[in-house]
Amino acid sequence: MRIGSLLTAAALLATSAAVASQPAYAAGPAIQITKIYYDSPGSPDFGANSSLNGEYVQIKNTTRKPVTITGWTLRDRTKRSDHVYTFSRFTLRAGKTVTLRTGRGRSTATTRYWGRSGGTLAYIWNQTSDTAYLRNASGKLVDSCSYNSTRQAYRIC
């Protein structure tokens, strides 16, 4: 009976050691870029608003609490100042996604508009490769997502 108890204890110890030695996975950022639709339907064209709004980035709050992202920025790889979107007064609700569209429109709790217009140069996201950078109001990188493909029109991040 005592040997059986020792064997059971040894098996439990080995099992708990194996579980403890599993690699820990780092949690992703609380606010994440989840999708970039970089090749809008109909583009390249002359920058029609409907085509510009077909180009977008989705950002999700993965937490159970609302997060204020006022002053946060989203930009592409270029260093052009007109390729930076700054969130005005905005709170992303718990578990929700906001879609940032390149063109013009009326902003809501789920959709924001960059407000770009003016032809083919109004597009933000390159159709072959680019990177989206999301930074908080202090300028710290929160998340990024890159793509390098002409076979897809979007990237799930």
Image: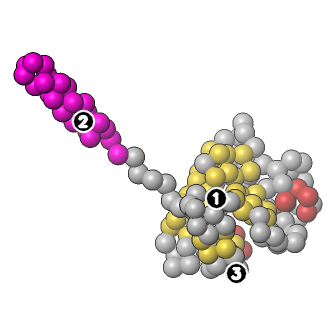
| Disc ID at residue 16 | 2
Is mark 3 in CB contact (under 8 Å) with mark 1? no
Residue 114 or residue 27, whichever sits in front: 27
- Tag of residue 95: 1
Distance between the Cα atoms at labels 1 and 2?
33 Å
- Give percent across and percent down for residue 26: 41, 51
Query: Tag 3, which secondary structure?
Result: loop
Instruction: Residue 110: give x, y in percent of width and height.
Output: 77, 64
Q: Quadrant of residue 120?
A: bottom right
* Membership of 20 in magenta stretch: yes
Q: In this view, does 54 lie to the left or right of 67?
A: right
Give how far across and how far down residue 136 sits, in percent.
Answer: 55, 73
Residue 7 visible at all: yes
Q: Give the range drawn in magenta.
A: 1-24
| Residue located beneath label 3 in the image | 89
| Dot 2 alpha-carbon crowd within 10 angstroms: few under 14, some 14 to 19, many 20 or more | few
